[in-house]
Image: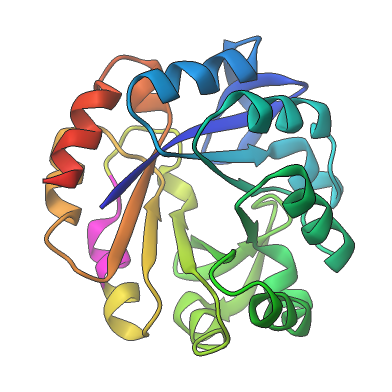
Amino acid sequence: MIVFPAIDLKGGQVVRLAEGDMDRATVYADDPAAQAERFAAAGAEWIHVVDLDGAFAGESVNGIAVRRIVNAFRGNVQLGGGIRSREAIERWFDYGVVRAVIGTAALTDPDLVKGAARDFPGRIVVAVDARDGMVATAGWADVSDVPVIDLARRFEDVGVAALLFTDVGRDGMLRGVNVEGTVALADGQSLPVIASGGLAGMEDIAALKPHTGIEGVITGRAIYDGRIDLADAIEAAAR
């Protein structure tokens, strides 16, 4: 299982939000590229980067910071936040991003996602962000009437690399990952699932690891607050 340390960008800084609320941001670092290097030194082969401003704006806002991260990090960068056009997908791949995470457009423009997944197999991740089991979009500001499992099933067998499942109500709150919801999503369709939202400690990794349909887990605040050691988490997940 892969541990994805997270770098969430707001105004060029590394932050974590509470429950996806842009007004409840804690700043952890002023140099995102240096943070990526620290993650690499701890053994991370992947990092998960989110342009939070871009998620609300619908287009890249922290592009300079993202490019610096890509240049500094010697592993694989998975990027989400405001990626809603074919042009944006191709531009980020040209810059060296390995995977593009698409959330809002997966609901509003599924043909865009399916076409990109076919043309770039294994490089498109569909974000299925949930509030009370329904898909949340536009930086989690809006909630649709589409159940998470229904959205996920739309992208089976088109070349999507994985689903990124976030329980929005837990994100940044250190309440523990929604293991039950993550496993249910993994069991309910054929794509691998990446768990996100609320990882509190090593016990979450231990709970997720036995499930073969779960590819990985994203962790942010638990690392920044010192609740887990990234190197230990990577080692535990790889066993």
Residue 206 belongs to magenta span:
no
Q: Nearer the viewer, residue 137 or 236?
A: 236
Write down the region rendered in magenta. 177-183
Left or right of 43, for residue 40? right
The location of residue 147, given as percent across then percent down, is 51, 79
The location of residue 49, given as percent across then percent down, is 59, 38
Disc tally is 0
The location of residue 90, given as percent across then percent down, is 81, 60
Left or right of 84, for residue 104? left
Q: Residue at x 65, y 33 (%)?
A: 70
Image quadrant assignment for residue 203: top left
Q: Residue at x 59, y 75 (%)?
A: 121
Let me know if residue 23 appears in the view.
no
Question: From what the image shows, is residue 79 above or below residue 103?
Answer: above
Q: Nearer the viewer, residue 22 or 183?
A: 183
Q: Nearer the viewer, residue 28 or 143?
A: 28
Q: How is the image coloured?
A: rainbow
Q: Residue at x 89, y 62 (%)?
A: 87
Residue at the extreme top of the image, as rendered: 30
Let me know if residue 178 appears in the view.
yes
Question: From what the image shows, is residue 181 above or below residue 173?
Answer: below
Image quadrant assignment for residue 173: top left
Q: Residue at x 50, y 90 (%)?
A: 157
Image quadrant assignment for residue 117: bottom right
Left or right of 239, for residue 7? right
The location of residue 205, given as percent across then percent down, is 19, 44
Magenta segment, prevailing SS (helix, strand or loop): helix
